[in-house]
Image (spheres, rainbow, N blue to C red):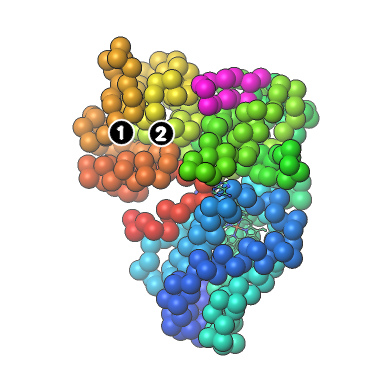
Amino acid sequence: MSSTVLTSRSSLLSERSAAVVSATASVVAAHAEQITARFYPRMFAEHPELLRLFNQGNQATGEQSRALAASVVAYAVQLIDPAAPSFDHVLERIAHKHISLGIRPEQYTIVGHHLLGAVGEVLGDAVTPEIADAWNEVYWLFATQLIAEEARLYQQAGVDPARPLRRYRVVRRIEETQDVVSLVLEPEDEGGLPEIIPGQYVSLFVDLPNGQRQPRQYTVSSTGTGNRLQITVRRVRGVNGAPDGQVSGYLHDIVKVGDVLEVSAPAGDFFIQPSNGPLLLASAGAGITTVLPIVEHIARTQPDRTVIVAHADRTAQDHALRETVLHVGRQLDDFTAYTWYAAVDPEDRRSHQGFMDLSNIPLPADIQVFTCGPLPFMRHVRATLLARGIPASRIRYEVFGPDLWATQMSA
Ligand SMILES: Cc1cc2nc3c(=O)[nH]c(=O)nc-3n(C[C@H](O)[C@H](O)[C@H](O)COP(=O)(O)OP(=O)(O)OC[C@H]3O[C@@H](n4cnc5c(N)ncnc54)[C@H](O)[C@@H]3O)c2cc1C
Ligand code: HEM
Protein backbone atom coordinates (compact mmCIF):
# COMPACT_ATOMS: atom_id res chain seq x y z
CA MET A 1 0.00 0.00 0.00
CA SER A 2 1.52 3.32 -0.97
CA SER A 3 1.42 6.39 1.21
CA THR A 4 0.80 9.82 -0.28
CA VAL A 5 2.52 13.10 0.47
CA LEU A 6 -0.40 14.83 2.02
CA THR A 7 0.63 18.34 2.95
CA SER A 8 2.37 21.11 1.11
CA ARG A 9 2.48 23.27 4.20
CA SER A 10 2.08 27.01 4.68
CA SER A 11 1.09 27.91 1.14
CA LEU A 12 -2.26 26.20 1.77
CA LEU A 13 -3.57 28.90 4.09
CA SER A 14 -4.49 32.33 2.69
CA GLU A 15 -2.11 35.11 3.76
CA ARG A 16 -4.83 36.95 5.65
CA SER A 17 -5.85 33.87 7.61
CA ALA A 18 -2.22 32.91 8.25
CA ALA A 19 -1.70 36.21 10.10
CA VAL A 20 -4.87 35.72 12.17
CA VAL A 21 -4.06 32.09 12.96
CA SER A 22 -0.50 33.07 14.01
CA ALA A 23 -1.90 35.72 16.33
CA THR A 24 -4.56 33.45 17.89
CA ALA A 25 -3.00 29.96 17.79
CA SER A 26 -1.70 30.12 21.35
CA VAL A 27 -5.12 31.17 22.73
CA VAL A 28 -6.89 28.41 20.81
CA ALA A 29 -4.22 25.90 21.92
CA ALA A 30 -4.66 26.94 25.55
CA HIS A 31 -8.41 26.33 25.30
CA ALA A 32 -8.37 23.42 22.83
CA GLU A 33 -9.41 20.74 25.29
CA GLN A 34 -12.18 22.93 26.71
CA ILE A 35 -13.37 23.48 23.13
CA THR A 36 -13.44 19.81 22.17
CA ALA A 37 -15.02 18.92 25.54
CA ARG A 38 -17.92 21.25 24.57
CA PHE A 39 -17.91 20.09 20.98
CA TYR A 40 -18.96 16.46 21.58
CA PRO A 41 -22.01 17.08 23.81
CA ARG A 42 -23.22 19.76 21.37
CA MET A 43 -22.85 17.45 18.40
CA PHE A 44 -24.38 14.40 20.10
CA ALA A 45 -27.36 16.45 21.33
CA GLU A 46 -28.20 17.40 17.75
CA HIS A 47 -27.08 14.13 16.13
CA PRO A 48 -27.67 11.30 18.60
CA GLU A 49 -27.14 8.82 15.74
CA LEU A 50 -23.41 9.66 15.91
CA LEU A 51 -23.14 8.16 19.41
CA ARG A 52 -23.04 4.79 17.65
CA LEU A 53 -19.93 5.78 15.73
CA PHE A 54 -17.87 7.16 18.60
CA ASN A 55 -16.19 4.94 21.17
CA GLN A 56 -18.02 5.87 24.38
CA GLY A 57 -15.11 4.60 26.51
CA ASN A 58 -12.87 7.20 24.83
CA GLN A 59 -15.57 9.81 25.43
CA ALA A 60 -15.73 8.91 29.13
CA THR A 61 -11.96 9.09 29.62
CA GLY A 62 -11.68 12.25 27.47
CA GLU A 63 -9.01 10.65 25.26
CA GLN A 64 -10.80 11.26 21.99
CA SER A 65 -11.46 14.85 22.94
CA ARG A 66 -7.75 15.37 23.69
CA ALA A 67 -6.69 13.65 20.46
CA LEU A 68 -9.01 15.85 18.39
CA ALA A 69 -7.84 19.03 20.15
CA ALA A 70 -4.17 18.13 19.75
CA SER A 71 -4.58 17.26 16.07
CA VAL A 72 -6.34 20.52 15.18
CA VAL A 73 -3.74 22.61 17.03
CA ALA A 74 -0.83 20.67 15.48
CA TYR A 75 -2.40 21.01 12.04
CA ALA A 76 -2.74 24.79 12.44
CA VAL A 77 0.82 25.12 13.75
CA GLN A 78 2.34 23.26 10.82
CA LEU A 79 0.36 25.46 8.44
CA ILE A 80 1.94 28.62 9.82
CA ASP A 81 5.36 27.31 10.83
CA PRO A 82 7.43 25.83 8.01
CA ALA A 83 9.87 24.39 10.59
CA ALA A 84 7.16 22.33 12.35
CA PRO A 85 7.53 18.53 12.10
CA SER A 86 5.77 16.77 9.25
CA PHE A 87 2.09 16.20 9.88
CA ASP A 88 1.63 13.47 7.28
CA HIS A 89 1.69 10.53 9.68
CA VAL A 90 -0.97 12.12 11.92
CA LEU A 91 -3.21 12.74 8.95
CA GLU A 92 -2.66 9.23 7.66
CA ARG A 93 -3.53 7.68 11.03
CA ILE A 94 -6.78 9.68 11.31
CA ALA A 95 -7.78 8.84 7.73
CA HIS A 96 -7.27 5.12 8.36
CA LYS A 97 -9.30 5.26 11.57
CA HIS A 98 -12.05 7.16 9.76
CA ILE A 99 -12.34 4.72 6.89
CA SER A 100 -12.56 1.80 9.29
CA LEU A 101 -15.63 3.54 10.74
CA GLY A 102 -17.25 4.47 7.43
CA ILE A 103 -16.88 8.25 7.92
CA ARG A 104 -18.38 10.14 4.96
CA PRO A 105 -17.61 13.59 3.46
CA GLU A 106 -21.02 15.04 4.32
CA GLN A 107 -20.37 14.39 8.02
CA TYR A 108 -17.54 16.95 7.94
CA THR A 109 -20.14 19.70 7.67
CA ILE A 110 -21.71 18.54 10.95
CA VAL A 111 -18.34 18.27 12.74
CA GLY A 112 -17.18 21.65 11.39
CA HIS A 113 -20.42 23.36 12.46
CA HIS A 114 -20.17 22.08 16.04
CA LEU A 115 -16.42 22.47 16.38
CA LEU A 116 -16.53 26.12 15.36
CA GLY A 117 -19.67 26.57 17.47
CA ALA A 118 -17.74 25.22 20.45
CA VAL A 119 -14.89 27.68 19.76
CA GLY A 120 -17.46 30.48 19.96
CA GLU A 121 -18.96 29.06 23.19
CA VAL A 122 -15.58 28.86 24.91
CA LEU A 123 -13.88 32.01 23.65
CA GLY A 124 -17.04 34.17 23.47
CA ASP A 125 -16.74 37.73 22.19
CA ALA A 126 -12.99 37.30 21.60
CA VAL A 127 -13.97 35.47 18.42
CA THR A 128 -14.38 38.28 15.90
CA PRO A 129 -15.79 37.44 12.44
CA GLU A 130 -12.22 37.66 11.11
CA ILE A 131 -10.97 35.09 13.63
CA ALA A 132 -13.94 32.80 12.98
CA ASP A 133 -13.25 32.96 9.22
CA ALA A 134 -9.57 32.13 9.66
CA TRP A 135 -10.24 29.08 11.83
CA ASN A 136 -13.04 28.00 9.53
CA GLU A 137 -10.43 28.01 6.76
CA VAL A 138 -8.05 25.89 8.88
CA TYR A 139 -10.83 23.40 9.61
CA TRP A 140 -11.82 23.04 5.96
CA LEU A 141 -8.22 22.67 4.80
CA PHE A 142 -7.81 19.85 7.30
CA ALA A 143 -11.19 18.36 6.36
CA THR A 144 -10.46 18.56 2.64
CA GLN A 145 -7.17 16.73 3.03
CA LEU A 146 -8.79 14.04 5.17
CA ILE A 147 -11.72 13.64 2.77
CA ALA A 148 -9.33 13.26 -0.17
CA GLU A 149 -7.15 10.71 1.58
CA GLU A 150 -10.19 8.79 2.82
CA ALA A 151 -11.62 8.71 -0.71
CA ARG A 152 -8.31 7.27 -1.90
CA LEU A 153 -8.27 4.63 0.85
CA TYR A 154 -11.92 3.63 0.27
CA GLN A 155 -11.21 3.24 -3.41
CA GLN A 156 -8.03 1.26 -2.79
CA ALA A 157 -9.92 -1.10 -0.47
CA GLY A 158 -12.92 -1.32 -2.83
CA VAL A 159 -15.21 -0.16 -0.01
CA ASP A 160 -18.41 1.82 -0.48
CA PRO A 161 -18.45 4.22 2.52
CA ALA A 162 -22.24 3.91 2.65
CA ARG A 163 -21.78 0.17 3.38
CA PRO A 164 -18.45 -0.15 5.17
CA LEU A 165 -19.22 -3.38 7.09
CA ARG A 166 -19.32 -7.05 6.19
CA ARG A 167 -20.84 -9.87 8.18
CA TYR A 168 -18.39 -12.44 9.53
CA ARG A 169 -19.35 -15.62 11.36
CA VAL A 170 -17.42 -16.67 14.44
CA VAL A 171 -16.18 -20.17 13.57
CA ARG A 172 -13.91 -20.75 16.53
CA ARG A 173 -13.04 -19.34 19.95
CA ILE A 174 -9.59 -19.97 21.38
CA GLU A 175 -9.13 -19.20 25.06
CA GLU A 176 -5.50 -18.05 24.88
CA THR A 177 -5.05 -17.03 28.52
CA GLN A 178 -7.34 -16.25 31.42
CA ASP A 179 -7.98 -12.76 30.00
CA VAL A 180 -7.38 -13.21 26.28
CA VAL A 181 -9.58 -14.86 23.69
CA SER A 182 -9.02 -15.25 19.96
CA LEU A 183 -12.06 -15.22 17.68
CA VAL A 184 -11.66 -16.83 14.28
CA LEU A 185 -13.95 -15.17 11.73
CA GLU A 186 -15.11 -16.17 8.27
CA PRO A 187 -17.02 -13.89 5.86
CA GLU A 188 -20.68 -14.94 5.55
CA ASP A 189 -20.73 -14.03 1.87
CA GLU A 190 -18.72 -15.74 -0.82
CA GLY A 191 -16.43 -12.74 -1.37
CA GLY A 192 -13.27 -14.15 0.19
CA LEU A 193 -10.96 -12.27 2.52
CA PRO A 194 -9.94 -8.71 1.68
CA GLU A 195 -6.24 -7.89 1.35
CA ILE A 196 -4.89 -7.57 4.88
CA ILE A 197 -1.47 -6.06 5.42
CA PRO A 198 0.10 -7.61 8.53
CA GLY A 199 -0.25 -5.12 11.40
CA GLN A 200 -3.59 -3.72 10.20
CA TYR A 201 -6.78 -3.70 12.25
CA VAL A 202 -10.51 -3.97 11.60
CA SER A 203 -13.33 -2.09 13.30
CA LEU A 204 -15.97 -4.31 14.82
CA PHE A 205 -19.46 -2.94 15.52
CA VAL A 206 -21.43 -4.73 18.21
CA ASP A 207 -24.94 -4.33 19.57
CA LEU A 208 -24.48 -4.44 23.33
CA PRO A 209 -27.11 -5.87 25.70
CA ASN A 210 -27.84 -2.34 26.98
CA GLY A 211 -29.06 -1.37 23.50
CA GLN A 212 -25.97 0.67 22.59
CA ARG A 213 -24.20 0.00 19.33
CA GLN A 214 -20.45 0.46 19.63
CA PRO A 215 -17.37 0.12 17.45
CA ARG A 216 -13.90 -0.99 18.53
CA GLN A 217 -10.70 -1.75 16.63
CA TYR A 218 -8.94 -5.11 16.79
CA THR A 219 -5.72 -6.02 15.03
CA VAL A 220 -5.99 -8.93 12.64
CA SER A 221 -3.79 -11.22 14.73
CA SER A 222 -3.54 -13.96 12.11
CA THR A 223 -4.60 -14.68 8.56
CA GLY A 224 -2.89 -18.05 8.64
CA THR A 225 -5.87 -20.20 7.69
CA GLY A 226 -7.43 -19.85 4.23
CA ASN A 227 -10.58 -17.76 4.26
CA ARG A 228 -10.38 -16.99 7.95
CA LEU A 229 -9.06 -14.08 9.91
CA GLN A 230 -8.46 -13.96 13.61
CA ILE A 231 -8.72 -11.22 16.19
CA THR A 232 -7.33 -11.58 19.70
CA VAL A 233 -9.02 -9.64 22.48
CA ARG A 234 -7.71 -8.87 25.94
CA ARG A 235 -10.44 -8.34 28.51
CA VAL A 236 -10.21 -4.81 29.91
CA ARG A 237 -10.91 -4.65 33.62
CA GLY A 238 -11.92 -1.37 35.23
CA VAL A 239 -9.51 -0.05 37.83
CA ASN A 240 -10.10 2.42 40.69
CA GLY A 241 -13.88 2.19 40.37
CA ALA A 242 -13.99 2.61 36.57
CA PRO A 243 -16.30 0.16 34.77
CA ASP A 244 -15.00 -2.96 33.00
CA GLY A 245 -14.47 -2.64 29.26
CA GLN A 246 -17.79 -2.93 27.42
CA VAL A 247 -16.91 -4.49 24.09
CA SER A 248 -14.01 -6.67 25.25
CA GLY A 249 -16.30 -7.99 28.01
CA TYR A 250 -19.04 -8.65 25.46
CA LEU A 251 -16.68 -10.52 23.14
CA HIS A 252 -15.39 -12.59 26.07
CA ASP A 253 -18.67 -13.36 27.82
CA ILE A 254 -21.43 -13.31 25.23
CA VAL A 255 -20.16 -13.96 21.72
CA LYS A 256 -20.15 -17.65 20.83
CA VAL A 257 -19.32 -19.83 17.85
CA GLY A 258 -21.97 -19.34 15.15
CA ASP A 259 -22.66 -15.68 16.03
CA VAL A 260 -22.23 -13.01 13.37
CA LEU A 261 -20.13 -9.89 13.84
CA GLU A 262 -20.10 -6.78 11.67
CA VAL A 263 -16.56 -6.04 10.59
CA SER A 264 -14.93 -3.26 8.54
CA ALA A 265 -12.31 -3.64 5.84
CA PRO A 266 -8.74 -3.70 7.19
CA ALA A 267 -7.20 -0.31 7.90
CA GLY A 268 -4.14 1.17 9.57
CA ASP A 269 -0.66 2.15 8.49
CA PHE A 270 1.35 0.13 10.99
CA PHE A 271 3.01 -2.27 8.63
CA ILE A 272 6.47 -3.32 7.51
CA GLN A 273 8.08 -2.16 4.30
CA PRO A 274 8.98 -4.78 1.70
CA SER A 275 12.73 -4.55 2.30
CA ASN A 276 14.87 -7.34 3.62
CA GLY A 277 16.27 -5.40 6.59
CA PRO A 278 16.32 -6.78 10.14
CA LEU A 279 13.29 -6.18 12.33
CA LEU A 280 12.73 -5.71 16.04
CA LEU A 281 9.12 -6.22 17.15
CA ALA A 282 8.77 -4.90 20.71
CA SER A 283 5.37 -5.49 22.32
CA ALA A 284 3.67 -5.47 25.68
CA GLY A 285 0.32 -6.99 26.74
CA ALA A 286 -2.28 -6.95 23.95
CA GLY A 287 0.36 -5.43 21.62
CA ILE A 288 1.41 -9.03 20.88
CA THR A 289 -1.50 -9.11 18.38
CA THR A 290 0.59 -7.04 15.96
CA VAL A 291 3.60 -9.36 16.28
CA LEU A 292 2.11 -12.67 15.19
CA PRO A 293 0.80 -11.52 11.78
CA ILE A 294 4.13 -9.86 10.96
CA VAL A 295 6.15 -12.95 11.94
CA GLU A 296 3.71 -15.16 9.99
CA HIS A 297 4.07 -12.95 6.94
CA ILE A 298 7.86 -13.02 7.10
CA ALA A 299 7.87 -16.81 7.55
CA ARG A 300 5.73 -17.08 4.39
CA THR A 301 7.59 -14.56 2.24
CA GLN A 302 11.12 -13.84 3.56
CA PRO A 303 12.25 -16.68 5.86
CA ASP A 304 15.85 -15.45 5.63
CA ARG A 305 14.97 -12.04 7.14
CA THR A 306 16.33 -11.39 10.64
CA VAL A 307 13.57 -10.97 13.22
CA ILE A 308 13.93 -10.21 16.91
CA VAL A 309 10.81 -10.25 19.08
CA ALA A 310 10.77 -8.74 22.56
CA HIS A 311 7.65 -8.98 24.72
CA ALA A 312 6.73 -7.73 28.19
CA ASP A 313 3.77 -9.01 30.22
CA ARG A 314 2.61 -9.58 33.75
CA THR A 315 3.52 -13.28 33.78
CA ALA A 316 4.21 -16.08 31.29
CA GLN A 317 0.61 -17.24 31.84
CA ASP A 318 -0.66 -13.83 30.70
CA HIS A 319 1.56 -13.80 27.61
CA ALA A 320 -0.96 -14.54 24.85
CA LEU A 321 0.06 -16.13 21.52
CA ARG A 322 3.48 -16.92 23.00
CA GLU A 323 3.71 -20.50 21.74
CA THR A 324 2.28 -19.60 18.33
CA VAL A 325 4.81 -16.80 17.80
CA LEU A 326 7.66 -19.10 18.84
CA HIS A 327 6.37 -21.90 16.62
CA VAL A 328 6.16 -19.63 13.56
CA GLY A 329 9.48 -18.00 14.47
CA ARG A 330 11.20 -21.39 14.28
CA GLN A 331 10.49 -21.37 10.54
CA LEU A 332 12.85 -18.37 10.16
CA ASP A 333 16.60 -18.72 9.65
CA ASP A 334 17.44 -16.01 12.19
CA PHE A 335 14.82 -15.53 14.89
CA THR A 336 15.43 -14.46 18.51
CA ALA A 337 12.83 -14.04 21.24
CA TYR A 338 13.20 -12.16 24.54
CA THR A 339 10.66 -11.92 27.33
CA TRP A 340 10.25 -9.74 30.41
CA TYR A 341 7.67 -10.50 33.09
CA ALA A 342 6.66 -8.61 36.20
CA ALA A 343 6.77 -11.99 37.95
CA VAL A 344 8.99 -14.72 36.46
CA ASP A 345 8.27 -18.39 37.26
CA PRO A 346 11.11 -19.88 39.38
CA GLU A 347 11.83 -22.58 36.77
CA ASP A 348 11.94 -20.06 33.89
CA ARG A 349 15.66 -19.37 33.35
CA ARG A 350 15.30 -17.44 30.08
CA SER A 351 12.87 -14.63 30.89
CA HIS A 352 13.91 -11.36 32.50
CA GLN A 353 12.29 -9.82 35.52
CA GLY A 354 10.64 -6.38 35.38
CA PHE A 355 10.36 -3.78 32.62
CA MET A 356 11.67 -4.45 29.16
CA ASP A 357 15.27 -3.32 28.86
CA LEU A 358 16.59 -3.15 25.32
CA SER A 359 19.79 -1.32 26.20
CA ASN A 360 22.03 -4.36 25.92
CA ILE A 361 20.46 -6.87 23.56
CA PRO A 362 22.43 -7.35 20.33
CA LEU A 363 20.83 -5.33 17.52
CA PRO A 364 21.99 -4.98 13.90
CA ALA A 365 22.87 -1.35 13.07
CA ASP A 366 20.17 -1.07 10.38
CA ILE A 367 17.33 -2.46 12.54
CA GLN A 368 13.74 -1.32 11.86
CA VAL A 369 11.59 -1.22 14.96
CA PHE A 370 7.86 -1.81 15.36
CA THR A 371 6.48 -1.33 18.83
CA CYS A 372 2.99 -1.77 20.23
CA GLY A 373 1.76 -1.61 23.81
CA PRO A 374 0.71 0.94 26.43
CA LEU A 375 2.10 4.46 25.89
CA PRO A 376 4.53 4.46 28.86
CA PHE A 377 5.97 1.18 27.56
CA MET A 378 6.45 2.57 24.05
CA ARG A 379 7.97 5.80 25.36
CA HIS A 380 10.48 3.71 27.30
CA VAL A 381 11.31 1.51 24.30
CA ARG A 382 11.72 4.50 22.04
CA ALA A 383 13.92 6.39 24.50
CA THR A 384 16.19 3.35 24.97
CA LEU A 385 16.56 2.83 21.24
CA LEU A 386 17.15 6.52 20.50
CA ALA A 387 19.89 6.43 23.17
CA ARG A 388 21.41 3.50 21.27
CA GLY A 389 21.61 5.67 18.16
CA ILE A 390 18.65 4.22 16.27
CA PRO A 391 17.06 7.11 14.35
CA ALA A 392 13.46 8.02 15.19
CA SER A 393 12.52 7.49 11.55
CA ARG A 394 13.18 3.76 11.99
CA ILE A 395 10.88 3.40 15.01
CA ARG A 396 7.18 2.88 14.23
CA TYR A 397 4.48 2.48 16.86
CA GLU A 398 0.81 1.55 17.18
CA VAL A 399 -1.43 2.92 19.92
CA PHE A 400 -4.47 0.88 20.96
CA GLY A 401 -6.56 4.01 21.49
CA PRO A 402 -6.68 7.59 20.25
CA ASP A 403 -3.09 8.55 19.48
CA LEU A 404 -2.16 11.21 22.04
CA TRP A 405 1.52 10.80 21.29
CA ALA A 406 2.02 11.69 17.62
CA THR A 407 1.39 15.39 18.01
CA GLN A 408 3.83 15.66 20.95
CA MET A 409 6.82 14.16 19.18
CA SER A 410 9.44 16.42 17.74
CA ALA A 411 11.26 13.76 15.77
C1 LIG B 1 -5.71 0.37 16.16
C2 LIG B 1 -6.17 -0.40 17.36
C3 LIG B 1 -5.93 -1.77 17.43
C4 LIG B 1 -6.34 -2.49 18.56
N1 LIG B 1 -6.09 -3.83 18.61
C5 LIG B 1 -6.45 -4.53 19.70
C6 LIG B 1 -6.19 -5.93 19.79
O1 LIG B 1 -5.66 -6.54 18.86
N2 LIG B 1 -6.55 -6.57 20.92
C7 LIG B 1 -7.15 -5.93 21.97
O2 LIG B 1 -7.45 -6.59 23.00
N3 LIG B 1 -7.41 -4.62 21.92
C8 LIG B 1 -7.10 -3.91 20.80
N4 LIG B 1 -7.40 -2.56 20.73
C9 LIG B 1 -8.15 -1.94 21.84
C10 LIG B 1 -9.67 -2.13 21.61
O3 LIG B 1 -10.06 -1.43 20.45
C11 LIG B 1 -10.51 -1.61 22.77
O4 LIG B 1 -10.12 -0.29 23.06
C12 LIG B 1 -10.40 -2.47 24.00
O5 LIG B 1 -10.85 -3.79 23.72
C13 LIG B 1 -11.24 -1.89 25.15
O6 LIG B 1 -12.57 -1.76 24.71
P1 LIG B 1 -13.76 -1.98 25.72
O7 LIG B 1 -15.03 -1.65 25.03
O8 LIG B 1 -13.66 -3.32 26.35
O9 LIG B 1 -13.45 -0.94 26.85
P2 LIG B 1 -14.22 0.46 27.08
O10 LIG B 1 -15.59 0.21 27.55
O11 LIG B 1 -14.03 1.28 25.87
O12 LIG B 1 -13.35 1.04 28.27
C14 LIG B 1 -12.01 1.46 28.01
C15 LIG B 1 -11.43 2.07 29.28
O13 LIG B 1 -12.19 3.21 29.63
C16 LIG B 1 -12.57 3.12 30.99
N5 LIG B 1 -13.91 3.75 31.15
C17 LIG B 1 -15.02 3.43 30.46
N6 LIG B 1 -16.06 4.18 30.91
C18 LIG B 1 -15.57 4.95 31.91
C19 LIG B 1 -16.12 5.91 32.77
N7 LIG B 1 -17.40 6.25 32.71
N8 LIG B 1 -15.30 6.49 33.68
C20 LIG B 1 -13.99 6.17 33.76
N9 LIG B 1 -13.41 5.28 32.97
C21 LIG B 1 -14.18 4.67 32.05
C22 LIG B 1 -12.65 1.63 31.28
O14 LIG B 1 -12.50 1.36 32.67
C23 LIG B 1 -11.48 1.13 30.49
O15 LIG B 1 -10.30 1.26 31.21
C24 LIG B 1 -7.01 -1.83 19.61
C25 LIG B 1 -7.27 -0.46 19.52
C26 LIG B 1 -6.87 0.25 18.41
C27 LIG B 1 -7.17 1.72 18.33
C1 HEM C 1 -11.20 17.93 10.19
C2 HEM C 1 -12.07 17.13 10.80
C3 HEM C 1 -11.67 16.00 11.70
C4 HEM C 1 -10.57 15.86 12.47
C5 HEM C 1 -9.41 16.82 12.63
C6 HEM C 1 -10.67 14.58 13.15
C7 HEM C 1 -9.71 14.09 14.01
C8 HEM C 1 -9.76 12.83 14.59
C9 HEM C 1 -8.74 12.28 15.43
C10 HEM C 1 -7.45 12.97 15.85
C11 HEM C 1 -9.13 11.03 15.77
C12 HEM C 1 -8.36 10.03 16.65
C13 HEM C 1 -7.50 9.17 15.72
C14 HEM C 1 -6.69 8.13 16.47
O1 HEM C 1 -7.20 7.05 16.69
O2 HEM C 1 -5.54 8.40 16.84
C15 HEM C 1 -10.43 10.81 15.17
C16 HEM C 1 -11.19 9.68 15.34
C17 HEM C 1 -12.52 9.62 15.00
N1 HEM C 1 -13.22 10.49 14.21
FE1 HEM C 1 -12.50 12.19 13.44
N2 HEM C 1 -11.84 13.99 12.79
C18 HEM C 1 -12.48 14.82 11.92
C19 HEM C 1 -13.70 14.58 11.31
C20 HEM C 1 -14.55 13.56 11.65
C21 HEM C 1 -15.88 13.39 11.13
C22 HEM C 1 -16.53 14.26 10.08
C23 HEM C 1 -16.42 12.32 11.75
C24 HEM C 1 -17.81 11.77 11.55
C25 HEM C 1 -18.77 12.00 12.39
C26 HEM C 1 -15.41 11.79 12.64
C27 HEM C 1 -15.54 10.67 13.44
C28 HEM C 1 -14.52 10.07 14.14
C29 HEM C 1 -14.68 8.87 14.91
C30 HEM C 1 -15.99 8.10 15.10
C31 HEM C 1 -13.42 8.58 15.45
C32 HEM C 1 -13.05 7.41 16.40
C33 HEM C 1 -13.29 7.93 17.80
C34 HEM C 1 -12.87 6.95 18.87
O3 HEM C 1 -12.47 5.83 18.58
O4 HEM C 1 -12.96 7.36 20.03
N3 HEM C 1 -14.29 12.56 12.55
N4 HEM C 1 -10.78 11.91 14.44
Please name the residue shown 47% across and 62% down the image: 70
Q: Are marks 2 and 1 in contact (CB under 8 Å)?
A: yes
Quadrant that contains the N terminus: top right
Answer whether residue 188 is visible to the viewer in this image.
yes
Question: In which quarter of the view is residue 302 placed?
Answer: top left
Location of residue 361 with respect to 409 vertically, above or below:
above
- Predominant secondary structure, magenta span: strand
Q: Is residue 178 magenta?
A: yes
Q: Residue at x 56, y 64 (%)?
A: 37
Q: Secondary structure at mark 2?
A: strand
Mark 2 or mark 1: whose residue is earlier in sequence:
2
- Give the mark count: 2
Which numbered disc covers residue 163?
none
Magenta-colored stretch includes residue 366: no
- Percent position of residue 353, x then y: 28, 26
Residue beneath the point at 74% across and 62% down: 47
Q: Which residues are magenta?
A: 172-183
Q: Amino acid at mark 1?
A: Met
Tell me, for residue 284, which label it has, or none. 2
Q: Quadrant of residue 253?
A: top right
Q: Which residue is mark 1?
A: 356
Q: Position of residue 311 (x, y in %)?
A: 37, 29
